[in-house]
Image (spheres, grey):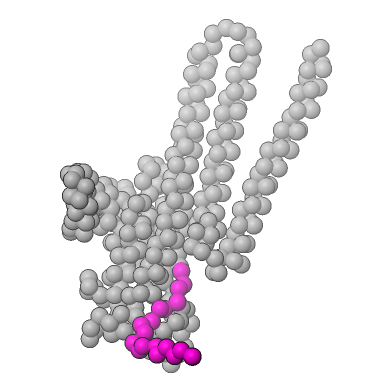
Amino acid sequence: MDGQKEQRNGQRRPARWILAGGVVLAAAVILFAAWIAGRVVGPRAGWLFQALTSGTFLFCAGVLFVCAVLFVGILAMLWRLGRPYRAQRRGEDGVAILEFALAFPFLLALALLMAQTSLAMVGNVCVHYAAFCAARAATVIVPKDFGRGEPRNRLLDGDDEEGKMHRIQRAAAWAVMPVSYGGEGIDPYDGVIADGLGRFFSVQNEPPPVWVDERLGRKFRYAMDHTYVTVRPAHRDDDDDDDLYDENEDLHVTVQHTFHLAVPYAARVFAFFPGGVRLDFGDGEFGSVMAASCSLPNEGVQDYVDIETFP
């Protein structure tokens, strides 16, 4: 009887290992195929497809999968080690507590790492959306005439808060604000959010929540201070004017955002990966530099009137 049971168990073990290996191989093939698709189709696809097939997203997906496999593997090992004690049907609480105490640090580390990886994947999607928002803003802001300094189809890099570049950067900052840092240590952005939401709640005859003046203002300040935008033509010749953008040509916009790593301990691990940086505020705050690009055609400004002719 026992021999038959051991034989059945021996037959199950290879099948389980084959199944586990098949799952890992399938996950690797899917990630590699997504990376190839992003390389081939990505430049012509929408921002969401580019985000889901970007190197950062696929890297985080791989880390998340490996951590999940290790997490489940440790739990399965604890369950397997405790099988003889459960079969004896007597109290072995001390042994169970000891096993859990030994495995708990590894399980906690994996759980924190999976949480930070999931947040990084969301942040990567927001950065790609920010690139799309900045490109969409550039297509309508670049053709406008802002005066002597920035006439139509010219874009100057400067610190003027009323200039074109600052408005394009603000469009990107709004997109990454939901995943930005909003804790203490950052001065709230002056009036932009509080005034707008205050008017919104006043229309509804409701007092604005307490988080409007402080937390959202700090999140927008972080987004503005840690988001950098560059705009250039998709193809520039050597004899082109560096500040002049032709109508109907593609505007290539790149957004670089330092994503705040918010999960304790796991943030330090992520800081060792490429793009990891130590932030200049707080005590032990880390971030990860993420970048995304988007190209949209310059709309231009029609300064003439079409004369319609009728038969």
For the point 66% across and 52% down, the residue is 29
Q: How many marks?
A: 0
Please identify the dominant SS of the magenta region.
Answer: loop
* 239 vs 37: above or below: below
Which x, y percent locates residue 85?
60, 13
The reply to whether the magenta stretch includes residue 81 is no
Viewer-side residue, 164 vs 119: 164
Q: Is residue 256 visible?
A: no
For the point 63% across and 18% down, the residue is 83
Viewer-side residue, 243 vs 197: 197
Name the image quarter holding residue 147.
bottom left
The reply to whether the magenta stretch includes residue 295 is yes
Which x, y percent locates residue 65?
57, 44
Farthest front residue? 311
Viewer-side residue, 194 vs 272: 194
Which x, y percent locates residue 113?
46, 42
Q: Is residue 31 visible?
A: yes
Which x, y percent locates residue 3?
82, 16
**Stretch of the chain drawn in magenta:** 294-311
